[in-house]
Image (cartoon, rainbow, N blue to C red):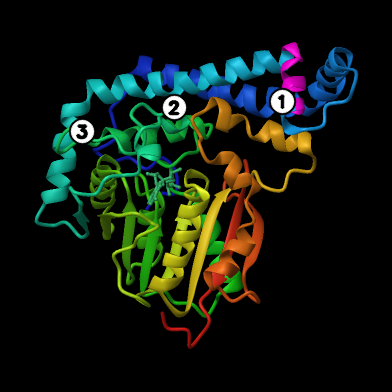
Amino acid sequence: MRVRDVQHPVLPQATADELSRQRAVVSLRKLLNMRVRSQNVRRFAEEGAPAFAERHGRQPQSPEDIEEALFASTDYRLWSAANRASQEMIWVAVGEPIFRDRARMEAAADALATSPNRKGSLTLAPDYDPSPEIAGTDVHLQPGGYARDDHPGDVVAGAFYETGGNVFSFGQGAGKGDSKAGVVFRLLDQDFPDLAPGKILDLGCSAGAASAAYADRFPDAEVHAIDIGAGMLRYAHARAEALGVAVHFHQMDAADLRFADDSFDLVVSHNMLHEIGADKRRAAMREALRVVRPGGVVIFQDVDTRFAPSEVHRVEKNWDTRFNGELFWKIYNDADLQADMIAAGFDPEVVREHHVEAVNNINRWYVISGRKPAGAEA
Ligand SMILES: C[S@@+](CC[C@H](N)C(=O)[O-])C[C@H]1O[C@@H](n2cnc3c(N)ncnc32)[C@H](O)[C@@H]1O
């Protein structure tokens, strides 16, 4: 499978005008995030904190103080407003081609999903009701959110995730191979060279970019992937079929897995932890441990926003919770994930946190890995 620029029939076919608008949004986001945002802590020190001190007669200390001080900086306010606007522009830029091309995409998805040559499968749970907090939120402003499902056959949520992700990630997103899975492949080679996974589970798969990458990397393995959104999963399944890889997709909650105990060699999740609250996170860790076999490995990869060097950095990083529909971003940033893994029952000797260079080198990822103690059947 190509590592970058994966093309398949369920992607919307954008016109030249639409592509140039998407490129413009990528360029604006690069500018705002790589050049302008990096100056926010300096803006706090030079402008925000002195203005706060003048107004209150003391230095900003609490997170609320620090946020007020950041907003006392004109340049910070400008960045914040522009960043929110650029995030909205992502969905306009990818939404136009999606809605124009929707009927063709849905027909293509259906043909792939029902083809006699299909390799994987899709199992939806029509009675499953995603929790209102996730179903009722446009997470990172994605229209309709992760659980969007307008009608039988709808694939819009997945199309938004893949095409929006490309623009969000500066042209390096989910549609272009999967650098996040690549990071886990590297970790498996380094830390678990003895593991030859015969059965793999991907939690919170969205458009299935990582799931397809596992099926490609381990062609003899049986790969399963779950998500809460039917529209996501239809898209992910059709995408995997188009790429010629076998993945079995299921509508399921990571906190309540419908798989037997001890049934996987490897359980992974990519960028799911920051999308769930503390209770679900702990339940998902317990469930991952339950379904992985003794000696099997569990790896949660996510955004590298934890461990801020100062309270100002921490408050600055939490911008997405307040302004970008990322309900659990701050909860994720502040969590003690190592303690959660150990409390879930992972062997404390081998629970490890890593900050790793992304495969594409433009960012870093956070990874926490654990192993089910041998002889610890669920
Ligand atoms: C940021 S996306 C990550 C997608 C994909 N793994 C990737 O890295 O490209 C998070 C996904 O987690 C899913 N999700 C959220 N809560 C979940 C839960 N309780 N169980 C399973 N999936 C969940 C969302 O629907 C969404 O598709």
Q: Is residue 241 above or below residue 196?
A: above
Residue furthest to the left in view is: 116
Front residue of 114/226: it is 226
- The three-letter amino acid code for the residue at tag 3 is Met
Any magenta on residue 72?
yes
Q: Which residues are magenta?
A: 65-74
Helix, strand or loop for disc 2: helix
Q: Secondary structure at mark 1?
A: helix
At label 2, the amino acid type is Leu
Which callout, 1 or 2, points at the residue further toward the start of the chain?
Answer: 1
Q: Position of residue 175 (x, y in %)?
A: 40, 41
Q: CA distance from mark 3 to mark 2?
A: 22 Å
**Residue under the image location 76 percent in, 26 percent down:** 65
Question: Which secondary structure class fits the magenta region best?
Answer: helix
Residue tagged by mark 3? 105
Real-space CA distance between mark 1 and mark 2, rounded to the nearest whole angstrom: 22 Å
Q: Secondary structure at mark 3?
A: helix
In the rendered image of this protein, does residue 63 appear above or below residue 271? above
> Compared to 138, does 348 lie above or below?
below
Closer to the chain start, of discs 3 and 2, is 3
Earlier residue among tags 3 and 1: 1
Q: Amino acid at mark 1?
A: Glu
Q: Which mark is residue 141?
A: 2
Q: Are marks 3 and 2 in contact (CB under 8 Å)?
A: no
Q: Is residue 131 left or right of residue 49?
A: left
**Separation (CA) of disc 3 from disc 1:** 43 Å
Q: Residues within 10 Å of mark 3 (few under 14, many from 20)?
A: many
Residue drawn 43% across and 18% down? 20
The residue wearing badge 1 is 67
Image quadrant in which the C terminus is located: bottom left
Mark 2 neighbour density, 10 Å: few (under 14) some (14–19) many (20 or more): some
- Label 1: few (<14), some (14–19) or many (≥20) C-alpha neighbours in 10 Å: many
